[in-house]
Image (tube, grey):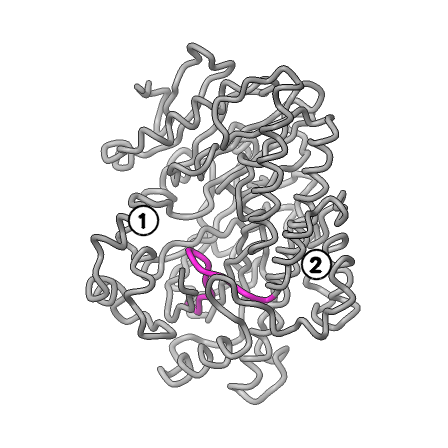
């Protein structure tokens, strides 16, 4: 499938065959030169064949093949004629990232400090596939309320600082959730609040090592040398099961609506259909679960810091800079047109002045947090007004260049250990996380520069990893 260059860092797959709209893909010269992922292009073209699309299907610079819509894919649907797709949201509904700032200077922390922090965090936050919450007893009886309202019940229970919701997308409470639309099996997998799972999920202690925009960084409370904390986790088994359940429902129902879907992974039904409304209500519950998950992890991290430094956590800062979602479908206005925007492995990117920005960030645009890998930097950026061309979306990370299976078969524990260099890892089981080695991912700087070079995003700060906690796959 040939890409036609549209301009700097921008390529086109023109509408042809069954496609109903074009595909636009963002890659800088280096990413384009090394791009070999024909499967992701095929998936973008298949998405472009769905009825009811508005504008092009968009591929982000971190794009790689997924299930149905590729990771790094964005598609917008007309709300009256369009479809909603479980596969275009993905398995880990509201997988997202939260950034905390601290009052600590990173260069004053010793190796013992970092290792003690990791030990205290891991003692509170279970990591790895299938691990369950340590807050189950306290949260018993509140689960449905959390699914329906997100952070609201957690605030009443003392897990939320008063200011936290003001710095979370949707205030940490996504509307429209109906727990009764979730299957019994999904409910059973909902015992994983305050866990980070496996794969690319992590908790990272880092340092703000470069500030590009002093004024905006100051607004976000970031300065050079500051110790930062990143939390990356989502809706865990509950969200996964909802995607599995409703992909099956949508595939069975599609024919009854006269739909011929290009793949099982792009299972979809009309937005206004019963199945579509049921999925949205279930997805919204998973979104709230994920916001609650990251909030509980934040609560545990605050307590871990308090234990290590023997003082109240508020004295150490640990304020939420921002928390935003990656895998989600949301009703949003773009140039006065109401759309259902699917972002899979992509994040919302609102420019200054956009009505949906938090009040504190109205004049700057909200922080966009783009994680790197275990050994490479992460970035905080803001969007410029040209982000309207991607339906106010940006990339969510570095993006894979190697499948997990390929990484496990070619990257040795020794290679991973060498790549980590001075970055501390909470365990010594390197053979169990080789699929997360930095060399399995794209160069984060190329990915970030793709949008920065064309003025779509503005760099604010760079965070370098000091210590990483990851769950085993």
Q: Name the residue beneath numbered marker 1.
A: 441
Q: Secondary structure at mark 2?
A: helix
Image quadrant in which you'd find residue 66: top left
- x then y, percent, for residue 198: 44, 60
What is the number of the mark on residue 429? none
Nearest the eye: 203 or 132:
132
Mark 2 crowdedness (10 Å alpha carbons): few <14, some 14-19, many ≥20: many
User: In the visual, does 62 lie left or right of 382?
Assistant: left
Task: Give the quadrant of the N terminus.
Answer: top left
Q: Compared with residue 311, is residue 414 higher up or lower down, i.e. above or below?
A: above
Q: Compared with residue 133, is residue 111 higher up or lower down, i.e. above or below?
A: below
Q: Compared with residue 462, is residue 156 higher up or lower down, i.e. above or below?
A: below
- x then y, percent, for residue 436: 34, 57
* Helix, strand or loop: magenta stretch: loop
Q: Name the residue beneath numbered marker 2.
A: 165
Mark 1 crowdedness (10 Å alpha carbons): few <14, some 14-19, many ≥20: many
The number of numbered discs placed on residues in the rendered structure image is 2
For marks 2 and 1, give the CA distance.
32 Å
Point out the stretch of residues depicted in magenta: 194-206
The magenta stretch spans residue 198: yes
Nearest the eye: 138 or 2:
138
- x then y, percent, for residue 334: 64, 28
Mark 2 vs 1: CB contact within 8 A? no
- First of labels 2, 1 by sequence position: 2
Q: Secondary structure at mark 1?
A: loop
**Residue placed at 60% from the left, 32% from the top?**
341
The magenta stretch spans residue 72: no
Image quadrant in which you'd find residue 281: top right
Q: Compared with residue 391, is residue 162 higher up or lower down, i.e. above or below?
A: below
Question: In front of the other: label 2 or label 1?
Answer: 1
- x then y, percent, for residue 4: 33, 18
């Amino acid at each position: 499938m040939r890409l036609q260059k549209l301009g700097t860092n921008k390529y086109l797959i023109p509408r042809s065959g069954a496609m109903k709209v074009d595909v636009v893909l963002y890659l800088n010269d280096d990413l384009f030169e090394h791009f070999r992922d024909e499967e992701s292009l095929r998936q973008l073209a298949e998405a472009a064949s769905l009825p009811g699309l508005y504008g092009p299907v968009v591929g982000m610079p971190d794009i790689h093949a997924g299930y149905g819509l590729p990771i790094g894919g964005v598609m917008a649907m007309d709300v009256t004629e369009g479809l909603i797709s479980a596969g275009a949201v993905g398995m880990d509904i509201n997988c997202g990232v939260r950034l905390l700032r601290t009052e600590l200077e990173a260069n004053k922390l010793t190796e013992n400090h970092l290792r003690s922090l990791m030990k205290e965090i891991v003692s509170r936050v279970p990591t790895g596939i299938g691990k369950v919450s340590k807050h189950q007893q306290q949260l018993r009886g509140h689960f449905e309320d959390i699914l329906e309202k997100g952070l609201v019940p957690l605030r009443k229970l003392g897990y939320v600082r008063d200011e936290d919701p003001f710095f979370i997308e949707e205030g940490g409470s996504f509307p429209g959730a109906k727990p009764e639309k979730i299957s019994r099996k999904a409910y059973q997998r909902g015992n994983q609040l305050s866990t980070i799972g496996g794969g690319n999920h992590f908790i990272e202690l880092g340092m703000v090592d470069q500030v590009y925009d002093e004024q905006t960084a100051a607004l976000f409370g970031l300065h050079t040398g500051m110790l930062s904390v990143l939390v990356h986790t989502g809706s865990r088994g509950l969200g996964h099961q909802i995607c599995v359940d409703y992909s099956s429902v949508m595939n069975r129902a599609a024919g009854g609506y006269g739909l011929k879907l290009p793949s099982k992974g792009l299972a979809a039904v009309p937005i206004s259909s019963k199945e579509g409304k049921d999925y949205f209500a279930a997805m919204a519950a998973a979104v709230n679960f994920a916001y609650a998950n990251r909030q509980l992890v934040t609560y545990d991290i605050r307590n871990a810091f308090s234990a290590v430094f023997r003082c109240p956590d508020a004295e150490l800062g640990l304020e939420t800079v921002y928390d935003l979602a990656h895998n989600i479908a949301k009703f949003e206005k773009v140039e006065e047109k109401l759309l259902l925007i699917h972002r899979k492995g992509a994040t919302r990117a609102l420019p200054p002045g956009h009505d949906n920005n938090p009040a504190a960030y109205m004049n700057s645009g909200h922080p966009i947090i783009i994680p790197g890998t275990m050994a490479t930097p992460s970035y905080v950026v803001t969007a410029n007004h040209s982000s309207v061309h991607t339906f106010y979306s940006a990339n969510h990370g570095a993006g894979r260049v190697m499948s997990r299976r390929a990484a496990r078969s070619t990257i040795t524990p020794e290679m991973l250990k060498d790549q980590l260099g001075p970055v501390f890892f909470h365990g010594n089981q390197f053979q169990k996380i080789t699929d997360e080695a930095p060399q399995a991912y794209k160069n984060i700087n190329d990915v970030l520069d793709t949008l920065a070079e064309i003025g779509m995003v503005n760099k604010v700060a760079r965070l370098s990893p000091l210590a990483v906690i990851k769950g085993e796959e």
